[in-house]
Image (cartoon, rainbow, N blue to C red):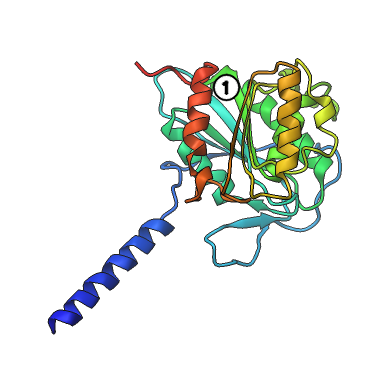
Amino acid sequence: MSRLNIIAATLLLGALNALSAEQAKPEPEAPGIVVKLWPQDAMPGRAVTGTERTLPARGDEVIRLTDISEPSFTVYRAESAKPSPAVIVSPGGGYGGLAYNKEGTEVAAWLNTLGVTGVVLKYRVPNNREGAFQDIQRAIRLVRQRAAEWHIDRARVGVMGFSAGGHLSARLSVHSDPATYPRIDAADDQPLRPDFAVLGYPAYLDEGLVPLVDGQTSPTFIAHAEDDKRFIKGSDAYFAALKDTKTPHAFFRCATGGHGHGLRSENDVKVWPAKCRDWLTQIGVLPSAR
């Protein structure tokens, strides 16, 4: 093989290795614990017809699920000597589907590196906002009820959502009482209000949520890029309401990143996980570095 061919082959191998590294998305190391939200024949609200399915691939390494007729969550436990914080993660997808790995399991893997248990929610889609809201209400109650079983600190249970999942998480943060479904069992005696909320490029915040922000709203971190032209105005309005009501908050607002990036961006918004970690430390969810 000539020297030029060797150089070309070396460059090609390097490019392929780089591509493989880029496509190797983080996932939790251990299998999760799957929990159905509702007892048999006890799910309130409107059911989703059909069977859960994966939408056609778009060439972006995103697993998109829809027709969630049996809502559930999967618990990815953190390795921690003491009971850990937990975060219920709601993937986005415009309430039509769920970007399940990019805004769900990959986020749970990151949370695990912080010593936080990630709880990835499969809420009812498509086109079932009220059902989805009942699902997240039930989820936070079940997590608190079974906190000892999963080595979770019941007083540090938060929510995190992306796009439509951000709207769902914010909705629980501002409208956590009373529940929108009748009591089913002992889990429904647990409190609904999240101890904190993290909203990644949330959608629809300016569609009725802003006036509900008050002194009882959960401490909130927002990450949003200015070039997400459709939804940044909602985050701006929500941030202003948090500020006016003196709700503990932080708003990481940057120039570039667009919408739907999860943890995968190379634009300005790529530092949002570090900003979020620092804020969680500041409010006492994560321990301070020694």
Mark 1 crowdedness (10 Å alpha carbons): few <14, some 14-19, many ≥20: some
* Residue 154 horizontal side relative to residue 263, left or right: right
Toward which corner of the image does residue 200 lie, by quadrant? top right
Q: Give the residue drawn at x 83%, y 25%.
A: 212
Q: Give the residue drawn at x 63%, y 67%.
A: 56
Quarter of the figure that contains the N terminus: bottom left
- Residue denoted by label 1: 147
Q: Tell me residue 245's x, y (percent).
A: 75, 17
Q: Is residue 181 above or below residue 108?
A: above
In front of the other: 214 or 287: 214
For this orientation, the residue located farthest to the bottom is 1
Q: Is residue 55 above or below residue 103?
A: below
In front of the other: 39 or 134: 134
* Element at label 1: loop
* Residue 135 horizontal side relative to residue 32, left or right: right
Q: Tell me residue 167's x, y (percent).
A: 73, 38
Q: Tell me residue 187's x, y (percent).
A: 71, 23
Amino acid, disc 1: Ala
Quarter of the figure that contains the C terminus: top left
Q: Give the residue drawn at x 63%, y 57%.
A: 64
Toward which corner of the image does residue 72 lie, by quadrant? top right
Q: Give the residue drawn at x 70%, y 36%.
A: 37
